[in-house]
Amino acid sequence: MRFKSGLLIGIFGLIIVSLGGWSFAIGISILIYFALLELFKMAENTGIKPATKTTLFSSVLIILSTYLEVNGIIEKEISNAILPIASIIICTWLLFQPKPGKISDIATSIFGLFYLGLLPSYWIKLREIENLFNSSEYTGTILANSKYFSGLSVTLIACLLIVSSDIGSYFIGKKYGKRSLSSISPGKTIEGLLGGISCSILTGILFATLFKWDNSILIGISFGIVVSLMGLVGDLIESMMKRDAKFKDSGNLLPGHGGILDRIDSFIFTPSLIYFTILILDTLKIF
């Protein structure tokens, strides 16, 4: 059952990444919706009462508005306004409940908006990155020097790096792991971390070379380190929340795999760092 569930998850991810467009944006929105429900269920188990419906709606709105923004359908200022406006609405909603909200209620709601709204929206920006580089404001060299640079190639590579890092961490940690990395997740070791980073770097160099990107070794190393470390942070953050809520898994929607949040925790912090790494490397004319 675990293998079948994992295979279906992988196929679903590959399909929506390959399709791009609205299919990708809606697919991300669906994952975010269920992941937020799991996050708030864990929070409620600790006595916190977040503004669930408002945050759910706002997070999905951030994802969809990001797609509209990068495709030039709405102005950037409109998309950027959703996070602060939604935060104000959430605080106001909690203020006027029969039992006014606590600091923890506000903090959890705003965190949910950022954690599963703003951060995952960068997957949309990565997948549609050609639109940024085709804009009149763009002065970099990626499109001119890298024939095979595209939103599809970058998104697929980012996903593959996360998977290769997870695989490397698991097998190398299982065979050679001796020194615990964090008390939050005792199963993770320093040796596993180094194994994950190494596998991620090698995968990054391989695909950067196959796609004929300039400075493929430097780009592969940069992407590999960023993706592996951010995947680890995402994993540990979710483990910390589950421990606090006394949950083994974030949910049971995926047989053998737990919840949606259990499967996407490594994918949450990654896209924003990859996106800005690309912009920095491009500004430095490294591509």
Image (cartoon, rainbow, N blue to C red):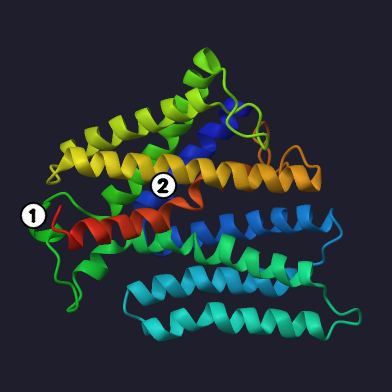
Farthest front residue in view: 179
CA neighbours of label 1 inside 10 A, class few (<14), some (14 to 19), many (20+) = some
**Side of 177 relative to 276 (left or right):** right
Identity of the residue drawn at 31% across and 34% down? 201
Res 211 quadrant in image: top left
Pointer 2 or 1: first along the chain: 2
Farthest top residue in view: 175
Residues at badges 2 and 1 in contact (C-beta under 8 Å)?
no
Which amino acid type is shown beneath numbered disc 2?
Ile
**Camera-side residue: 72 or 141?**
141
| Residue 170 seen | yes
Which amino acid type is shown beneath numbered disc 1?
Asn
Instruction: Examine the rendered structure and indicate whether residue 89 appears above or below residue 265.
Output: below
Mark 2 or mark 1, whichever is nearer to me: 1
Q: Secondary structure at mark 2?
A: helix
Res 111 quadrant in image: bottom right
Which dot marks residue 145?
A: 1
| Residue 211 seen | no
Q: Secondary structure at mark 1?
A: helix
Instruction: Examine the rendered structure and indicate whether residue 8 appears above or below residue 49.
Output: above
Q: Position of residue 163 (x, y in %)?
A: 44, 35
Quadrant into which the N terminus falls: top right
Identity of the residue drawn at 31% across and 79% down? 72
Q: Which residue matches tag 2?
A: 15
Q: Position of residue 233 (x, y in %)?
A: 53, 45
**Camera-side residue: 84 or 126?**
84
Res 212 quadrant in image: top left
**Side of 22 relative to 141 (left or right):** right
Q: Position of residue 264 (x, y in %)?
A: 55, 46
